[in-house]
Image (tube, rainbow, N blue to C red):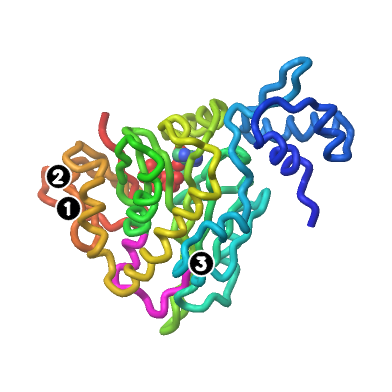
Amino acid sequence: MRRPLEARVHAHLAQGGFQSGAELARRLGVSRSAVWKAVVSLREGGLVVHAVRNRGYRLAAPCEPLDAAKIRAALRSGVRERIRDIETAWSLESTNAALLARTDLAPGQADVLLAEYQTAGRGRRGRAWLAPPGGAICLTLAWSFREVPRDLGALALAVGVCVLRALRRRVEEPIALKWPNDLMLGDRKLAGILIEMRAESGGPTYVVIGIGINVALGAAVLERIAAAGTRATDLKSAGADPAPRNAIVAELIGEMVPGLAVFEREGLRPFVEEWKAADALRGRAVRVQTGETSARGVARGIDIGGALLVETPQGLRKFISGEVSVRPEE
Ligand code: ATP
């Protein structure tokens, strides 16, 4: 299938530097106004494209286009064989939704789907996950457990440790884990995890693990996220090179696949110490919202099953992830 013009314009601009509208139009075999319309549409999605008279267009933060062959080639052996399928799409409603619809993945194998842009990216509780085209890593990895793993409810915590291990190679500043499913730099969200699943009774458990990593968001998207009540940051602001997204994706898959195999055998236990060492909330005053009720207290880490411990005036309370939202108190 021919990729949309936005994707092809993005791929040219992703090489960095200025490209004139006329040159882009010639290379892509379209009119200059078609190029302009594609740039407008990329900007509407939140991508920062500079346009300078007599010089042309330039991306504020060039990131290489996602490329399934490059990702596969960068996987080490032992991991590569476990990946049945890697696909990259220009635009999808949601990478989780697309993989949730599949039914035929054998245990011990993974499918990976990435999109440059999600038109309906999902967070928890029906909330939106926002990212500009080409400025993030929106990845879903589907996995099928042979049987229901013991600590399934804490899978997001184990995945958090895997994402942390991968991103640490790129970011010097310490990355923290905010219970249950976010990766933080200071009080800003760098990445989020959304796990959705389908359990067949007595049979394998099929999970889709969505990971959104902010690479270079741009001011407009940062503002839209702030308007929804979250402070966000990205790899670029943390001093990491935003360009080599395919290598970053390969590093991520390289941590996730062995991590999932360990989780299947041993549950959360092998991840707990690393999780605790990166706990963003420990010792902080928090408000925990569960449906209509909220509790206040001091976060006291997690227990061996991944439940959040909060010391409240009524005593130590445990929260399991589900639909719980935790906010540090200012
Ligand atoms: P809470 O903060 O209540 O614990 P959460 O951390 O589980 O919720 P998610 O549901 O995982 O949040 O993600 C959705 C929320 O994340 C949205 O409400 C929005 O404020 C914020 N958000 C959306 N896109 C991004 C992004 N690219 N980076 C950081 N935060 C984002």
Location of mark 3 (residue): 80
Q: Earlier in the sequence, mark 1 or mark 3?
A: 3
* Residue in the picture at 57% in, 38% down: 135
Residue mark closest to the camera, 1 vs 3: 3
Residue mark closest to the camera, 3 vs 2: 3
| Amino acid type at image mark 1 | Arg
| Amino acid type at image mark 2 | Thr
Magenta stretch containing residue 147, yes or no? yes
Q: Which mark is residue 178?
A: none
C-alpha gap between disc 2 and disc 1: 7 Å
Magenta stretch containing residue 254, yes or no? no
- Above or below residue 52? Residue 156 is below
| Amino acid type at image mark 3 | Arg
* Residue in the picture at 32% in, 56% down: 157
Q: Which mark is residue 312?
A: 2
Location of mark 1 (residue): 317
Q: Position of residue 240 (x, y in %)?
A: 44, 35
Q: Quadrant of residue 113?
A: bottom right
Residue neighbourhood size for the residue with mark 3, other residues' Cα within 10 Å, grouped as few (<14), some (14–19), many (≥20): many
**Near-viewer residue (43 or 260):** 260
**Most extreme residue toward the top, as rendered?**
53
C-alpha gap between disc 3 and disc 2: 47 Å
Q: Position of residue 169 (x, y in %)?
A: 38, 45
C-alpha gap between disc 1 and disc 3: 42 Å
Q: Secondary structure at mark 1?
A: strand
| Discs 2, 1 touching: Cβ within 8 Å | yes
**Stretch in magenta:** 143-155
| Discs 3, 2 touching: Cβ within 8 Å | no
